[in-house]
């Protein structure tokens, strides 16, 4: 292809992959490790908002393979993009033009789970759900959980510093990822595979790669701390009249049951409507309500948390803090996972509306839902299908989504940069957990200072002077960035 599509924009092709490269990669990986046809799925992002035109996908099986691919690419200035599960929501994992795609899915060996320390070591191409299953069988769990768990790979999760549903209890990957093996853009292998929780010997280099979105190196191995699984979990879906009452409810649950909370999520009526309408899920409660909370408690003592929860519900229902609800323990797995599905399926359901303008912001809780309200006013005369908000309220992370039947530049112009100005005014983040990718790169300045961005660019140039790795993402390799002030 000669042109690429980003939303409605046509951009000329900027680099041509030569056939000689494919031959060289074939020498490193064998013919099985190089794919040059049927590449649509690798070139298109999960939201179908961008299509690159790469003509080569490489499938390394070992760290040494990755090292040789990068050594060759570095010497010949071949641009590359590393791809894991390709579930990025910010056009991070697909080529912008015709970069070589390095797919990590064949590097999927589990190396070891140490039952004493709970440290799991594995290659970076393992599917999150497979890892969860593996450690569950040894009474542990992976310290994060995403709706995309069936497709995303642990290397992609670390490269995006994924947050997800367990963040409220187990914190960010920066706390749980203890070791990494990384192949640098010049092909050198950086061994940071520690399993120690404590290590103050110089700069904490692994943190530079957590959340670096494939711009500084390729993660090939991981050591991650897996906490003990508690024996019982209870999930509840609660209906609430207003956002203000929802915040009250959150405070009460923190006060009364704080030590048991393992996830605390909110969704508004339109988010629930999308799941029920687009995915044909049954209505979970007797009617639609303005707001819902889906939260999970875990403990080794089921009777104790169930009793406390029931007492709390009866008090909160009689004073109208909550309107309706249902709950299930994980001993009734079908019901339990059924309740969780309402929250986990919103992203998938919104795709069915047509085009999705997706925002993943964090805000102080006082103005959290204000971001959705202002969007209703702003888009009043526009041809949108749905405006909705849901997210990890315990982490101040809102997923604000607007959908329309097809891409409409007028809607985009009304949202951006208006929304980012709002976020910046409240000192929030324009990307709480999905990253910057290609889609949000011009808005980095709303969350990062001029000095921070300059330093990021210096680091990129130091580690990847030929700018071969995911160069057009995160704006990391580019010379100038416009600042308003
Ligand atoms: P990819 O999409 O393939 O890659 C993501 C980025 O990481 C790209 O920039 C890529 O170049 C880079 N990369 C990939 N592998 C490596 C590697 N081995 N070394 C270096 N760089 C690499 N995100 C959340 O944070 N929380 C959520 O709750 C959440 N829910 C989601 C639900 C759905 C239904 C979907 C579709 C997405 C969701 N996401 C969520 C976004 C997405 O799943 C995450 O960003 C995820 O971590 C990406 O993993 P992946 O394996 O698909 O990586």
Image (cartoon, rainbow, N blue to C red):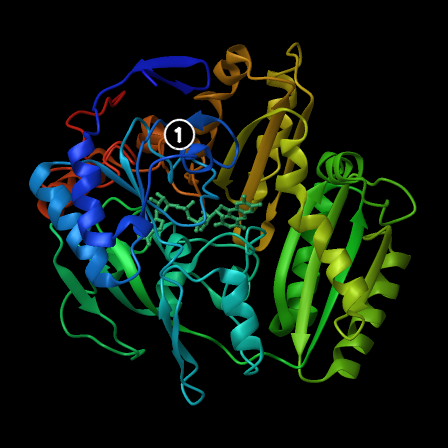
Mark yes or no: residue 185 visible.
no
Residue 297: x, y in percent?
68, 69
Residue lying farthest to the front in this orientation: 31
14 up-or-down from 470: above or below: above
With 379 as the anchor, is 81 left or right in this view? left
Q: Which residue is mark 1?
A: 439
**Residue 452 visible (yes or no):** yes
Does residue 158 appear left or right of residue 323 in this picture? Answer: left
Image position of 294 (left or right of 3): right
> Is residue 318 or residue 296 the one in the foreground?
296
- The residue at the point 24 percent across, 62 percent down is 63
Dividing the picture into quadrants, the one containing residue 22 is top left
- x and y, in percent, of residue 223 in the image: 34, 72
In the depicted structure, whether residue 483 falls above or below residue 364: above
The percent coordinates of residue 391 (x first, y second) are 60, 46
Which image quarter holds the C terminus? top left
Q: Taking 98 as reference, is 382 left or right? A: right
The residue carrying mark 1 has its beta carbon less than 8 Å from ligand 1 = no
Element type at mark 1: loop
Q: Nearer the viewer, residue 323 or 154?
A: 154
Q: Quadrant of the N terminus?
A: top left
Quadrant location of residue 121?
bottom left
Q: Position of residue 246 (x, y in %)?
A: 71, 49
Residue drawn at x 76%, y 64% as measured from the top left: 336
Name the foreground residue: 350 vs 383.
Answer: 350
- Spot the residue most to the bottom: 116
Local crowd at mark 1 within 10 Å, few (<14), some, or many (≥20)?
some
């Amino acid at each position: 292809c000669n042109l690429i599509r980003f939303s409605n924009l046509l951009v000329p092709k900027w680099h041509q992959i030569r056939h000689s490269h494919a031959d060289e990669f074939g020498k490193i990986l064998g013919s099985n490790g190089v794919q040059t046809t049927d590449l649509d799925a690798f070139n298109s992002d999960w939201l179908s908002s961008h299509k690159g035109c790469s003509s080569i996908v490489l499938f390394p099986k070992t760290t040494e393979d990755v090292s040789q691919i990068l050594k060759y690419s570095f010497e010949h200035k071949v641009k590359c993009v590393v791809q894991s599960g390709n579930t990025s929501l910010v056009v991070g994992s697909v080529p912008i033009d015709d970069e070589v795609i390095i797919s990590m899915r064949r590097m999927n060996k589990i190396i070891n789970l140490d039952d004493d320390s709970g440290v799991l070591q594995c290659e970076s191409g393992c599917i999150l759900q497979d890892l969860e299953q593996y450690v569950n069988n040894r009474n542990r769990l992976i310290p994060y959980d995403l709706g995309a768990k069936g497709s995303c790979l642990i290397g992609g999760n670390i490269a995006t510093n994924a947050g997800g549903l367990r963040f409220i209890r187990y914190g960010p990957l920066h706390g749980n990822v203890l070791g990494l093996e990384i192949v640098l853009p010049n092909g050198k292998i950086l061994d940071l595979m520690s399993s120690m929780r404590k290590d103050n010997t110089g700069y904490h280099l692994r943190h530079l790669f957590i959340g670096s979105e494939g711009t500084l190196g390729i993660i090939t191995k991981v050591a991650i701390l897996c906490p003990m699984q508690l024996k019982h979990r209870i999930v509840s879906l609660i209906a609430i009249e207003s956002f203000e009452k929802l915040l009250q409810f959150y405070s009460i649950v923190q006060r009364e049951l704080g030590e048991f909370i393992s996830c605390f999520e909110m969704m508004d009526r339109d988010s629930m409507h999308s799941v029920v309408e687009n995915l044909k899920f049954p209505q979970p409660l007797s009617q639609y309500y303005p707001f819902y909370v889906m939260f999970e408690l875990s403990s080794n003592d089921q009777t104790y948390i169930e009793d406390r929860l029931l007492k709390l519900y009866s008090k909160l229902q009689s004073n109208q803090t909550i309107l309706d609800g249902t709950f299930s323990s994980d001993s009734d797995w079908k019901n339990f996972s059924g309740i969780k599905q309402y929250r986990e399926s919103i992203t998938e359901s919104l795709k069915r509306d047509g085009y999705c303008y997706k925002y993943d912001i964090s805000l102080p809780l006082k103005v959290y839902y204000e971001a959705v309200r202002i969007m209703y006013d702003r888009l009043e005369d526009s041809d949108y299908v749905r405006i909705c908000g849901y997210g990890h309220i315990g982490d101040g992370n809102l997923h604000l989504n607007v959908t329309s039947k097809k891409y409409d530049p007028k809607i985009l112009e009304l949202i951006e940069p208006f929304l980012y100005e709002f976020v910046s005014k409240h000192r929030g983040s324009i990307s709480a957990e999905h990253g910057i990718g290609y889609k949000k790169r011009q808005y980095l300045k709303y969350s990062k200072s001029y000095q921070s961005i300059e330093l990021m660019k210096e680091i990129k140039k130091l580690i990847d002077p030929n700018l071969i790795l995911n160069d057009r993402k995160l704006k990391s390799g580019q010379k100038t960035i416009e600042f308003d002030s």
